[in-house]
Amino acid sequence: MAFTTTAILSYAAIAATAVSTYQTYRSNKAMAREAEAAADYNARVKEAEAAQVDAESREQIRRDRAAARRFASSQRARYAASGVLTSLGSPLEVLAYDAGQMELQSLERARAAEAYRRRGKAEAVGIRMEGASAAKGYRRAATGSLLSGAARIAGGASGFYNQGAFS
Amino acid sequence: MPVISRAAPAQVEAAVSPGVTRSLDTALAPHRGRLAIAEGLADVGGVLGQVATASAQLKNRADQLRVEQAIKADEADFQTWLETEPDETKWGVEADKRSRRVRESIASLKLAPVVRRQAEERLGAWAQDRQVVVANQAQRQTIKRNDDVLVAEIGIASDAGDKVAIDSLFDERLKLGTIHPDVASVARRQAYEQADAAIVARDIRLDPRLAIDKLAAETEGGKPKYYKDMSETARLSAVRSAKNALETMRAETAQEIAAQIFRQQMSGLDERLDYEVKTGGLTAETAANLRAFARGQRTPIDQASAGAQLWQHAIDLEPSDPNYIQEAMKLRASVQALDPVVRQPIIDVLNAKETDDVKEDTQRVYEALARDFRANTFGNAQTWTQGEIDALSGRDRRKAGNPVEGDPKDRKAYEEASAALFRHQRAMREFLQANPKATTEQIQAYRAQLTATDRQASLGGIAFDALSGAVPR
């Protein structure tokens, strides 16, 4: 079967459309994957940041509590050295008050760390959702490109056939 | 939970470091570039497709033209065929056959689907249209043939002078609608006129004298009494024809009586001549000449003189003259009272004028020379004038034979000249009949030779000279 110039051009046009469609499909799919990967990475970064702040806060609370205990011991020792009875009256109140204040401070720090950790988790979830949404968009675009490419190929082939371009 | 590629977790685990995030735009940039390349490729495909479509359309246009050309060629061929096929019942079948053949020839072509569909639609419409057109043409042909028959019958009726038949045939044409009433009115008048012409022709053939009378007859109102539908031109022409016929009849009668005289059948001649004069079959003059001829009262000189005048008259006659036939027939009747020797050259002149034996140019030269010859003989003949006759004494007048004006002074020379003239005339006629394509130079050379011979060999030559005054007698 001898191909005419018209036939060669027709086949080339359809081939170009097919390759273009495939490349568009592949690109969209790759962009979907890339969007998910990037979002996951960024979420992990957020989670890592939250975990780090949490760990640092816990360590700080532990240290604050140790310091509070040391302060209470030293305060009691100072009271004892000065002859102040610490089990009754005002000294006891001072000791209790200081200990309470220091524990309150630790608790405040623990609450702030927990809030930060929770926000980091929530942000990671949001970032992942955004990534998933973008990936879904790209996947749909890939499907759309397949459909539009198929339509172009079918329309072009039909037109070429009707015009007798293949013969 | 989003799906992460197999490579991604390891990369993320390996690469994660707090505070450092990845930009989505940067991540997608290579793929967006590939997408742009794909779009470019799609554009290239579109352009290639446009070029391919344009190229295919060019070929398709050529194919469409080929289809049109096939239709036109077949249409032209079919019209030619129609002109050669008088039987219109075959037209429809032939049209279908040809349409099918064209369809088959188009079907055998390698055509694009769109062109094939268009061609099939076009051929279908064309075949259908042609079927209708051919059916109409066939119907028109049938009507035309029927009308042609009626027209031919009208012609026959006109030739037969049957006006009743003409009326009924025209009524039939009007019923068929093949002729418009206004046109029919004019055509009917023409047919009537033709019928009258046929009737008058028949009357002339039967008896020209009666036809002449009927043509001249008028009503009290001054309108023609007979042949009422004839035009004035046709009437004049009919009168001329009738006179021609009358003179022809007279010439034939004179010829018949002359033949009777030559056979010496004299019994009843006078009665016959009287009867012919009375009924118009002969003029009184011709009858008198024939009577004198029969009684031997026409001398050779008289005959030569009369013959010369008639011959001159014959020479002068123009065949293009509308009255030529009448005049020629009168001449033919008159020459019957002459001796055959004198008569024949005159009849030859008339015959030569009425036949195409001698070419027109040769005839023209011949007549010019004949006139020249006559001018050299009779034209210069010394004839008596009235003054000369009056000047003569009674004795001289008797001695000269009591001449009248125009008589030759030397009657013997005149007679001899006439004889020589007729001899010369006959020789020239024979030469021209033998050499119808003779050039002017050849005719003149022969004439010079003839004249020289004639002068040496006959008294006629001397007579010419004497008459023309060239040689004293």
Image: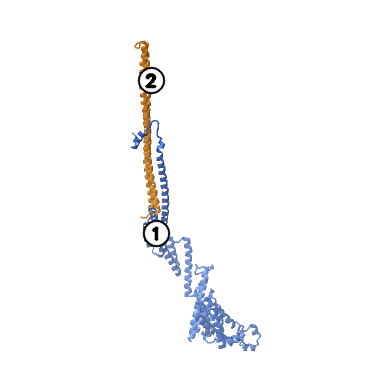
Chain colours: A orange, B blue
Q: Is disc 1 in contact with disc 2, using a CB cutoff of under 8 Å?
A: no
Q: Which residue is mark 2?
A: A105
**Quarter location, residue A58:** top left
Q: Position of residue B128 (x, y in %)?
A: 39, 56
Residue B36 shows up from this direction: yes
Work out whether disc 1 and disc 2 sit on a shared chain. no
Q: Position of residue B47 (x, y in %)?
A: 42, 48
**Quarter location, residue A100:** top left
Please tell me whether mark 1 or mark 2 is closer to you in this view: 2
- Report how many numbered discs are placed on residues in the image: 2
B321 in relation to A92, above or below: below
Marks 1 and 2, how far apart at CA: 116 Å
The foreground one among A155 and B46 is B46
B341 in relation to B169, above or below: below
Question: Circle 1: is it few (<14), some (14-19), or many (20+) Cα within 10 Å?
Answer: some
Q: Which mark identifies residue B135?
A: 1
Q: Chain of mark 1?
A: B
What's the amino acid at mark 2? Answer: Gln
What's the amino acid at mark 1? Answer: Ala
The foreground one among B123 and A52 is A52
The foreground one among B167 and B122 is B122
Where disc 2 sits, the SS reads: helix
Q: Chain of mark 2?
A: A
